[in-house]
Amino acid sequence: MKVLIFTLVRAFEFELAVPASEIVQKAEVVQRHVLRSDPENKIQIPLLIKPYKRN
């Protein structure tokens, strides 16, 4: 299982789809992240996922 995750993570580039200042932490039993502009829409961290291009 670890090999599969390692292979998949290396095959893609991950970046935030919103500015980092738009993500705030919400303290509950555990710390969670929500969007400052949409706090009612539960826990989320929007990501852009693209295939990794090797040179």
Image (cartoon, grey):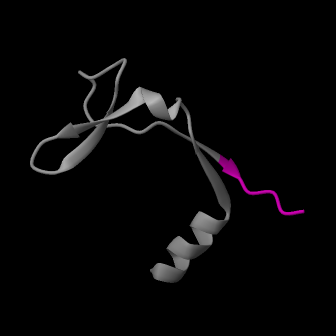
- Residue 51 magenta-highlighted: yes
Q: Which residues are magenta?
A: 50-55
- Residue 11 magenta-highlighted: no
Q: How many marks?
A: 0
Q: Looking at the image, is 35 positioned above or below residue 55?
A: above
Quarter occupied by residue 7: bottom right
The answer to whether 35 appears left or right of 4 in the picture is left
Residue drawn at the location 58% of the way across and 65% of the way down: 9
Residue 53 image offset from top left, x and y in percent: 81, 57
Residue drawn at the location 71% of the way across and 53% of the way down: 51
Q: Nearer the viewer, residue 52 or 16?
A: 16
Query: Hey, which residue is sitting farthest left in the picture?
Result: 29
Residue 13 image offset from top left, x and y in percent: 66, 53
Q: Looking at the image, is 36 positioned above or below residue 48?
A: above
Residue drawn at the location 84% of the way across and 63% of the way down: 54
Quarter occupied by residue 17: top right
Residue 47 image offset from top left, x and y in percent: 52, 41
Q: Looking at the image, is 14 positioned above or below residue 40?
A: below
- Magenta stretch, main secondary structure, is loop
Q: Nearer the viewer, residue 29 or 5?
A: 29
Q: Looking at the image, is 23 positioned above or below residue 36?
A: below
Which quarter of the rendered picture does the N terminus lie within?
bottom left
The answer to whether 47 appears left or right of 11 in the picture is left
The answer to whether 13 appears left or right of 2 in the picture is right
